[in-house]
Structures are given as structure tokens and as C-alpha cells.
Amino acid sequence: MDVTINKKLNIDKTNWTLVKFGDVVFEPKESIKNPAEDGIKHVVGLEHIEPENIHLKNSASIEEATTFTKRFSKGDVLFGRRRAYLKKAAQAHFDGICSGDITVMRAKDVLREDLLPFVVQNEKFFDYAIKHSAGGLSPRVKFKDLANYQFLLPPIDQQAQLADLLWAMDDVLESENDVLQENRNLKDSVSNYLLLGKNTITDKYQKSPYGAIPKDWKLVNLFNLRDLNDRYSFTGGPFGSDLKSSHYTKEGVRVLQLQNIGEGEFLDNYSIYTSTEKANQLLSCNIYPGEIILAKMAPVARCCIIPDYDDRYVMSSDGIRLKVDTKHFDNKYVYHALNSIHFRRYAETKSTGSTRARIGLSDLKAIPIPIPNSIVVQKEIVAKLESLDQVSNNLVSKISSSKALQKSLINQVF
């Protein structure tokens, strides 16, 4: 689809009807006492819904321990009513049960089922949901409040045409995402090859938690990668009581939350702040551009490099700062090693918790990574990996443009 971001739809809305959300959508409120006996195979929590993605691609199995009883059906939209600012709303392509923090939405006869996801994935709808959320640290919005949201509903025949257009745009996005995933899979394969020294010409090897590595490489625990000149070079975020929602401000020093830590990328779509005074009180939890932040919570040990948008940041309780000793270790090499599949899988074995895995600071600091003795070799490996990253970055940029177009189309329609 060769279209530009500035393209405008020429839509005649003169025969559209102003309706309330509750006039065309309802909350089924069905429950199941024995999901396994009823043949339910999928369990969905908030963590399974990706922000601003209409596709529900993840779920847990019914064999996993769960207390969920809320039922949803194929075609329903699952809306994350807790922390609506995360913009989690996806259409299910299977039956299942879900968390109480998810509102199940089902279209009435006057609204096409395939158009409902786009009605919900609209900036005005999310803004309305955020405005009508109640609660401090974890605000929630009720369906009875969402039911009063108003929008223009097209006649049923036009709904079909609009649904075809919006899903065609979504097909473009999905195709681009598939190409991106293929490149990332290639990167994972090459990373495993290079970061375990499999390209090294040698007949001498040593054992490691990840298999055999060259004898002349080092196994260095994360704690021993830290900069010894900084007393806080390997440290966790503050205790919950030291940084609460009451400490948040409209401006000041940015607080980095779990949702800012992507798998190898900094996610900039969520911002909260605390005062400079509070940030100074939490100096041991400050983190700076170029340093590495890791996540304690699932996916455990995912990490990214801190961007230079600000001079400094404050970590939330589930962040871990790593300031690398750059005299002996290449910072980018450490970053790539931490994002490797073999490291992440090993870190998962050290995590605890059945519902949502977590790894402690003491367990994380003891995990080793294989590193070539020569920092020159470290840099050579980084150069090869970052050439693949550049391909991914170009694809991400293209996908970002497609998403902007999709969002523009949805906002123009609704």
C-alpha cells in the first residue's frame, strides 16, 4: 500500500448517527467455575495485551495456576481497564478466561464485530477512559463510565467498507512486522554464534552455563562488570515507600518504569516525573545516559541503554542500574550479551514467582557472561551485531510510519 502519512480520507458523515458506546457495545459478564472442564485453553492477563496493538497474540495455558473466572469469546475486545493510559485493547481470536482488570467488550447487532477494535483503538476513546479512571497508584475505569462515550456511527453498509480499509492497513503493518521479526530471529542466531565465541578458531574450550566457550575468554559475573569508581554502579531502584505516587510531579526528573524497559530498546511512550529534591534524596537510584537498565520483573533481565533525552533519571523499584567499567569491557558488548537468548534463558532459571517471574538483585549480580579478553575483539563483535540492528532500525522506522498512518485513519473515521 503506497500511501503517505498526510493522506486524508474523504468521508461524508452526514448520515452517520451520534451514539453512546453503551448503545452499540455491551459487557457480557460471563464467568466459568471450572475452565478446564469447559474446554478453555487460554488465560489472558494484562501482561498478554500489547499497548496499541489490536491483535491478542499472547496468552497463558489453562494448566498454569490461575484464579481468573471471567469468560470471553472469539471476536470480543479485551480492554485493559487498569492503567488505561497504557492503551491496551485487543480483539481475541480464541475463547478463554481473563483477569478482572480486563473489561470484555462485545458488539451489538448495530455495530460490526470487525469494526469494534478500531472504535476502541481511537485516541479520543483512550483519552475518555483515562479521564474517567479512578484510583491513585493503579487507576481503573468501569464499563458503565465508558458506556457514556459518544461517537458517530456509520450505517452498517459503510461499516463494512471502513472495516475493509482499516484491516487492509493492518495487513500492511502485520507484513512489515513479520519481516522485522525474521531479521530479529537472524540477529538472535548470529548473537548466539558470536557471543559464545563459536566463530573463534581454537581447539581449547572451557565449560560455561551456556555451553563450551573459548578457553581464552573470561566468565565475568555482572557485579564484576561494574565501574569501581562509582559506589552505585550496580544497584536497584528504591523501596516502594521511598517513591510513591504522591511523589510524582508534572515535571522534574523523569522516573523510569518497567514499561520503559523494552527488550533491547528504550520505550518512550510513557513518562512520569518526580521533583529534583526527591531525585537528590534517591541518588543511589539515579541512572544516566549511556548506562544499562535491567528489569527485575518478567520478562526478567530484559535491558536497554538509557537515552540522552535528559541529564539523569530515577529508577522505579523494579529497575537495576549497571554502569560498566569501560576500561576493561565494551559497554555495547555487555548490552548485547545481556540481551542474548542464552543469557535471558539462564536468568529466567534464577527467577521466582509463578504468576509473574521476578529476579532479585543478588541472583542477578552472580550471573556470568562470556567475554573475550581483548576489548578490540569485543568491539569487532559489536560492529557485526549492530549492522543487523541497523536493518531492524530501518524496518522499525518504516513500521512507525505505517502505524502513524493507521492511527490517522482511525482518528479520522471515529
Image (tube, rainbow, N blue to C red):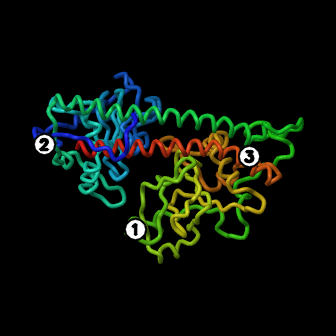
- Residue 381: image tag: 3
Is the residue 26 above or below the residue 262 in the image?
Answer: above
Q: Is tag 1's residue or tag 3's residue first in the polypeptide sequence?
A: 1
The one of 406 and 197 positioned closer to us in this rendering: 406
Q: Residue at x 14, y 33 (%)?
A: 155
Q: Residue at x 74, y 40 (%)?
A: 194
Q: Is 346 displayed left or right of 370 in the figure?
A: left
Answer few, some or many: residues within 10 Å of disc 2's Cα (few below 14, many 20 plus, some between 14 and 19).
Answer: some
Is the residue 163 above or below the residue 269 in the image?
Answer: above
Answer few, some or many: residues within 10 Å of disc 3's Cα (few below 14, many 20 plus, some between 14 and 19).
Answer: some
Q: Which mark is in front, 2 or 3?
A: 3
Q: Is tag 2's residue or tag 3's residue first in the polypeptide sequence?
A: 2
Residue under label 2: 19
Q: Quadrant of residue 77?
A: top left
Element on which disc 3 rests: helix
- Distance between mark 2 and mark 3 Cα atoms: 58 Å
Point out residue 114 in the picture as x, y percentages from the top left corner.
27, 30
Q: Is tag 2's residue or tag 1's residue first in the polypeptide sequence?
A: 2
Q: Is 321 displayed left or right of 66 in the figure?
A: right
Element on which disc 1 rests: strand
Element on which disc 2 rests: strand
Residue under label 1: 248
Amino acid on which the number 1 mark rests in the picture: Tyr
Point out residue 11 in the picture as x, y percentages from the top left corner.
20, 40
